[in-house]
Image (cartoon, rainbow, N blue to C red):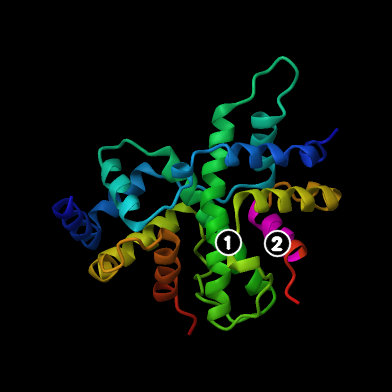
């Protein structure tokens, strides 16, 4: 039995695992939470949860970008050909946005990190 | 914390924090189909005699929290920028249960196709799954 075949009956387990999480465990990665965790990382203590979350974000943004690029649709941003939308690029772009417009984002205290990231990519890599 | 936040952003502007980050982070690529399914099996379908891996389950849950919310938001942002939507989510939201169920359906339905692309991003499977599960009418 191949691994993909084995998944046939198993995805429900992940759904059950998620459903079993307490409501407060449903993660809303706000900008404030991201910055708090990023600050604690300066000492070298990596936060694995944040890394995994950001990896999911990078995967999601790239998948949507590839879908619309391949179907020749209008794009939200245009990543230079020598760049890959990996976790490092994601963090660099979010931090670039915060350095430039952090005060503006402070007016939206509950803004979600992916909203900041998408706006950051749009500003940093406009399609000209 | 406000003072620390100001200091942090000032340092971001100078580029020195990015330099620190760059030394502590590798450019981790998107999660491949192979890695996703490997973790899935370790978390929920271990070999006989082996315990289910809590670490793999945690990884998948954290990853899904990031990917699922971003897929919906990124799709909406691209559509707002002028693209024709590839999929249409009910109420514009995507739960992890719905995403994993759609992923399972896609992987099972087109197993031989994805088995030849195990190095591809799981995000591509997710998009294909959403297009099938939530087509725009």
The reply to the same-chain question for discs 2 and 1 is yes
Residue B27 percent across, percent down from the top left: 47, 49
Q: Is residue A19 left or right of residue B33?
A: left
Residue depicted at 36% across the width and 42% down the height: B24
Q: Are marks 2 and 1 in contact (CB under 8 Å)?
A: yes
Residue B127 among those drawn in magenta:
yes
Residue depicted at 32% across the width and 64% down the height: A96
Q: Which residue is mark 1?
A: B71
Q: Which residues are the magenta region? A: B122-131
Q: Observer-nearest residue: A30 or B27?
A: A30
Residue A120 percent across, percent down from the top left: 39, 69
Residue A94 among those drawn in magenta:
no
Q: Label the magenta part by its dominant secondary structure.
A: helix
* Residue B57 quadrant: top right
Of helix, strand and loop, which one carries label 2?
helix
- Residue ranking furthest to the left: B3
- Residue ranking furthest to the top: B49
Q: Is residue B34 left or right of residue A116?
A: right
- Residue ranking furthest to the front: A23
Cα gap from disc 2 to disc 1, whole angstroms: 10 Å
Residue A100 percent across, percent down from the top left: 26, 69
Q: Which residue is mark 2?
A: B130
Classify 10 Å Cα crowding around label 1: few (below 14), some (14-19), many (20 and above): many
């Amino acid at each position: 039995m191949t691994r993909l075949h084995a998944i046939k009956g198993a995805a429900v387990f992940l759904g059950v695992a998620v459903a079993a999480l307490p409501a407060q465990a449903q993660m809303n990665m706000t900008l404030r939470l991201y910055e708090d965790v990023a600050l604690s990382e300066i000492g070298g203590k990596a936060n694995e949860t944040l890394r995994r979350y950001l990896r999911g974000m990078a995967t999601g943004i790239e998948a949507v970008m590839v879908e619309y690029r391949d179907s020749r649709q209008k794009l939200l941003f245009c990543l230079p050909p020598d760049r890959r939308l990996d976790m490092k690029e994601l963090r660099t772009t979010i931090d670039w946005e915060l350095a430039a417009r952090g005060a503006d984002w402070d007016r939206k205290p509950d803004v979600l990190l992916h909203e900041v990231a998408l706006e950051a990519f749009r500003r940093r890599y406009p399609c000209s | 914390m406000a003072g620390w936040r100001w200091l942090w952003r000032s340092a971001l502007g100078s580029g020195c924090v990015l330099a620190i980050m760059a030394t502590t982070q590798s450019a981790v690529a998107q999660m491949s189909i192979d890695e996703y399914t490997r973790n899935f099996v370790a978390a929920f379908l271990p070999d006989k005699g082996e315990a289910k891996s809590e670490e793999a389950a945690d990884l998948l849950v954290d990853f899904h929290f990031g990917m699922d919310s971003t897929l919906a938001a990124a799709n909406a942002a691209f559509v707002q920028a002028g693209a024709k939507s590839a999929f249409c989510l009910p109420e514009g939201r995507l739960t992890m249960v719905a995403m994993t169920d759609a992923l399972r359906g896609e992987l099972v339905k087109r197993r031989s196709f994805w088995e030849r692309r195990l190095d591809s991003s799981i995000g591509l499977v997710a998009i294909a799954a959403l297009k099938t599960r939530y087509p725009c009418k």
